[in-house]
Image: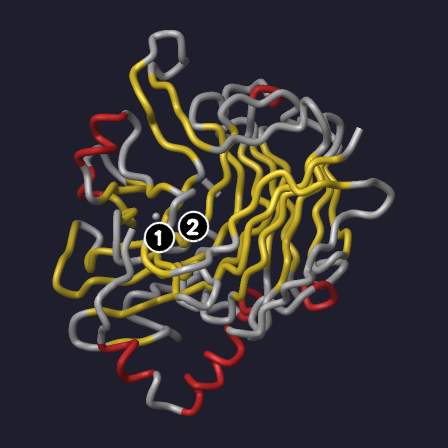
Amino acid sequence: MWSSLAPEVSFSQTASVETAQAENDQAKTNEKSEDDQWTPPGSVWELDWQDEFEGTGEVEKWYPMLGYNSEAYKASTEKGLRWSGKTEDSAWMYSSQTGNHWLDGDGNLVLRIVSDKTKSNEHGDKVSAAYLMSGYPQKWDKSEPNGVKWAGKFVSPKEAPLYISCRVRTDQVQGYSTWFAFWLFSQTRAYNDNPADGTEVDIIEIPKGEKNYLKTAFTAANHWKQGGGGSESKQFNALSEPKSLDLVDVSDSDYHTYGLEWSTEQMKCYVDGKLYYTFDDNIPSDPVDMMMLLTLEFKINAWDPNQGDGRVDGPCVSDDEKMREMSRAYVDYVRIYRKKK
């Protein structure tokens, strides 16, 4: 829809490792396949870019959203997102520079979203989240639509088709009105009503809420214009065909691989090697500054009018008098394959 150092050991990390359930969860976390090199059939693919998230501490290829120009980006430690009003105090969530994403030493990028009970804005307890991009605002440039030149890793199918994949475990994405997303976006061209320049492509979104269907639902989407008539979106849940559980159980403790096969004419969506949806129209065929994003997000009732408020209700990863961790995800890798000519 619409990111660095490991945090200090806290209430949640200290207490949870003392339980048998947490030990089982950690064992599941370590079940990583080194041989998972699946690519779409019918073509020969070569690995073009990858992040296996090895080591500990800071990520090197991803950048937290801290501003839309280089000065703001360098000066800020957080950035309010999803404003409901005219000031940052109306933000439903804040992307943080540190504390909510880290490399765990077992080959995972850990992402989390928390409600800080010691801080507030006009919506109540302040929400801080991992919101990572493969690009960042580099410098002012009058030739760019927004006056800013972005740098980093960008993706485009113009020269050759791509297969972009992410392997992730999402059983701890559970806070009401939170969601995990792996998506593509152009900060300089998206929503300009010219899809070829770049759009918002949601390779996978996993929303959570009080409604029963949100326990297993996930979504794929392509947005080329804000407002009505500028989106194609498909949600998979208990009522859809195929049903979400016929494809993948996003609430189990296994890793699952979500991928996008992307040419100038078409985008095909895969989960664990199964093709489940195809976009044929409004394809970003020659995008500019199209970056990848890994995010955990929050906005009350963003997906359903009765989704619930994960800051105070429903399941969570951990909770104490200072902080409630609403959701967490473990990312095994992100890989980009290019089709051989």
| Residue 128 position in % (x across, y down) | 27, 55
| Residue linked to disc 2 | 295
Marks 1 and 2, the one that precedes in the sequence:
1
Image quarter of residue 136: top left
Q: Is residue 234 left or right of residue 330?
A: right
Q: Nearer the viewer, residue 221 or 105?
A: 105
Going by the numbered disc 1, the residue's amino acid type is Ala
The tally of labels here is 2
Quarter holding the C terminus is: top right
| Residue 142 position in % (x across, y down) | 34, 8
Q: Is residue 132 left or right of residue 25?
A: left
Task: Answer few, some or many: residues within 10 Å of disc 1's Cα (few below 14, many 20 plus, some between 14 and 19).
Answer: many
Element marked by disc 2: strand
| Residue 247 position in % (x across, y down) | 72, 63
Going by the numbered disc 2, the residue's amino acid type is Thr
Element marked by disc 1: loop
Q: CA distance from mark 1 to mark 2?
A: 6 Å
Is residue 130 depicted above or below 320 in this figure?
above
Image quarter of residue 241: bottom right
Marks 1 & 2, CB-CB < 8 Å contact: yes
Is residue 22 depicted above or below 131 in this figure?
below
| Residue linked to disc 1 | 130
The residue depicted at 39 percent of the width and 7 percent of the height is 143
Q: Is residue 60 left or right of residue 140?
A: right
